[in-house]
Image: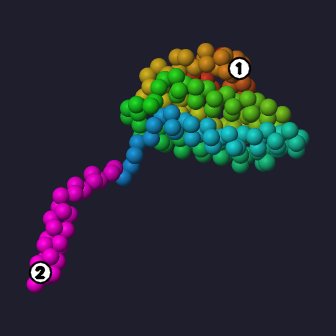
Amino acid sequence: MHALQFIVSFLALGTLSGYAIPSPEPKSSRQVPSIVGTLNTLQKQTSFILPEIKSIVASGVATKSSISPLIASVVSNANTAHTSLALVTSPAPTDTDAEAAAAIVAIIGQISSTLQGALVIPGLDDLIDELGLDPALSQIISGVDGVLLGVTDGIAQLFRDAGFPDVANFLDDLSLDLTLLALGIVV
C-alpha cells in the first residue's frame, strides 16, 4: 500500500513539475544577418575564388571562357550578400562604420586588383559587364550605406591606407562605373 502511495505521489509530482518549467520562447524562423558578418562571409568566399583567377592569368592560358565561371561565382556571392543585406533594417550592435568600411575596402580592393591583372584577357571588360559584377558590387555598397549612413565617407581614405591608392583607376579600367558612383568617387 505504501508503495502505491509513493508511486502515485511520484507521478503527481512529475506531472506538476512539468508545468513549472517555462517553455522557451519560439525563435524567429528567420534571423536578420549582421552587416559586418555578411561582408566578412563575402570576403571569405571571394578569397577562395580570386587566387584561382590569378593562377589562370599567371599560367598564360587565360581566356574569357576559362575565367568566366570564376567571375560568375564572385557575382553570385555578391548577389547573395546583397540579398542578405536587404533584410537588414537596422545595424546589429556589432556593426560599426569602421568595420563595414574596412570589409568593403578589402572586398573591392581584392576584386579590382585581381581583375586589373586579368585585363590581358581580350574582352574581359565585356565579360565583367555581361556577368553583372558592377551592379552586384554597387548594390552592396549602397545597401550598407543605407543602413550605416555615411559609411562610404571614409572609404577613400581607407583605400589609400590599405595600399589601394589607384582603386579609382582600377575600377574605371574595369568599367565599374556604378561601383565608383556608389563609393562617391568621380574619375
Residue situated in front as seen by the camera: 8 or 144: 8
Residue corresponding to mark 2: 2
Colour scheme: rainbow
In the picture shown, does residue 2 fall above or below 98? below
- For image coordinates 72% across by 39% down, the residue present is 50
Residue situated in front as seen by the camera: 63 or 60: 60
Amino acid on which the number 2 mark rests in the picture: His
Q: In this view, does 63 lie to the left or right of 142?
A: right
Residue 74 in picture, x, y percent from top left: 65, 42
Q: Residue 42 carries which label?
A: none
In the picture shown, does residue 168 fall above or below 12? above
- For image coordinates 79% across by 35% down, the residue present is 118
Q: Is the magenta stretch mostly helix, strand or loop?
A: helix
Residue corresponding to mark 1: 163
In the picture shown, does residue 7 fall above or below 43? below
- The span picked out in magenta is 1-28
User: Which type of secondary structure does the marked residue at label 2 adopt?
Assistant: helix
Residue situated in front as seen by the camera: 19 or 186: 19
Membership of 22 in magenta stretch: yes
For mark 2, does the 10 Å Cα neighbourhood hold few (<14), some (14 to 19), or many (20 or more) residues?
few
For mark 1, does the 10 Å Cα neighbourhood hold few (<14), some (14 to 19), or many (20 or more) residues?
few
Q: Is disc 2 in contact with disc 1, using a CB cutoff of under 8 Å?
A: no
Q: In this view, does 175 lie to the left or right of 178?
A: right
Looking at the rendered image, the quarter that the N terminus falls into is bottom left
Q: Can residue 15 be seen in this view?
A: no
Q: Residue furthest right?
A: 60
Q: Nearer the viewer, mark 2 or mark 1?
A: 2
Q: How far is the residue under mark 2 from the one under mark 1?
A: 83 Å
Q: Which residue lies furthest to the bottom in this view?
A: 1
Membership of 73 in magenta stretch: no
Amino acid on which the number 1 mark rests in the picture: Gly
Residue 147 occupies quadrant:
top left
